[in-house]
Amino acid sequence: EVQLLESGGGLVQPGGSLRLSCAASGFSFHTYGLNWVRQAPGKGLEWVANIIGNGGMSDYADSVKGRFTISRDNSKNTLYLQMNSLRADDTGVYYCAKEDNYGYEAFEIWGQGTMVTVSS
Amino acid sequence: DIQMTQSPSSLSASVGDRVSITCRASQTIKRYLNWYQQKSGKAPKLLIYGASNLQSGVPSRFSGSASGTDFTLTISSLQPEDFATYYCQQSHTSPFTFGPGTKVDT
């Protein structure tokens, strides 16, 4: 069974850092692009970042560029999101998502999410 | 960035109703349009990819169509488990923007 399991969320003060992890199983990890998507409380979905299968290319939403870094360890089947200089508006549930193999880069599989709260 | 709009923002419907949700892209995205369903407290679930392709395991009462930069998700006969929020998303150009969502309730 294809699964994604996020961890690493929690409460952090403004200006602080946090690293999220997403452990994958059930598929050929290095073959697929992966994404982080977040959802502020009561709000819609916001794409955060993505990274291609070999980790050689990544991209970010303007709202996190320069503060967040997406990476992956294909030997550990794990995706990461290093979040620095956190702000109150970074609060929300963070999901990792696996892209499809149909060529449309739809987000075929999602993790259950991990909650990040930025507050003093 | 490509902006995605959805209409309506919410709708009230009954079991058995035919429901349609529209999504419009601010520029051409070809058929790189995906639809997701999200229930309260749960992760989103992919329903339709590539504008009109049904994701494996999704009931056939869900369908998608496209006309230029306008896209439609249709539920042919609403079931109790379909009350949820629906999001469109373009995967043509980064950033992969989502629409604001459409909440379907009773």
Image: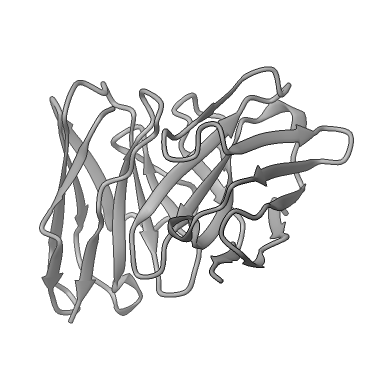
Side (left or right) of A43 relative to A20 = left
Evaluate whether residue A100 shows in this view: no
Report the number of numbered marks: 0
**For this rendering, which residue is in front, B58 or B36?**
B36
Left or right placement of residue A106 versus residue B14 in this view: right
- Up the image or down, B6 lies above or below A57; here it is below
Tell me which corner region of the image, top left, top right, bottom left or bottom right, holds residue A12: bottom right
Color scheme of the displayed model: one colour
Q: Quadrant of the N terminus of chain B?
A: top left
Instruction: From the top left corner, tell me how far across and down residue B43 is, in percent.
Output: 50, 62
Determine the residue positioned at 42% across, 40% down. A63
Q: Is residue B103 above or below residue A46?
A: below
- Residue at x 72%, y 51% (from the top left corner): A19
* Residue A35: image location, x then y, percent: 57, 39
Check the image and name the residue furthest to the right. Answer: A75
Q: Nearer the viewer, residue B62 or A58?
A: A58
Q: Residue placed at 41% from the left, 74% from the top?
A: B40
Q: Quadrant of residue A81?
A: top right
Residue B18, image quadrant: bottom left
Q: Residue furthest top?
A: A56
* Residue B46: % across, % down: 44, 50
> Residue shown at 37%/59% (left/top)?
B37
Compared to A70, does B43 lie above or below?
below
- The quarter of the image holding the C terminus of chain B is bottom left
B88 to the left or right of A67: left
Q: Nearer the viewer, residue A82 or A44?
A: A82
| Residue A51 in view (yes/no) | yes
- Find residue B50 and report its horizontal and vertical position in percent: 35, 32
- Looking at the image, which is closer to me, A62 or A16? A16
Indicate left or right for A54 with A97 as reference: right
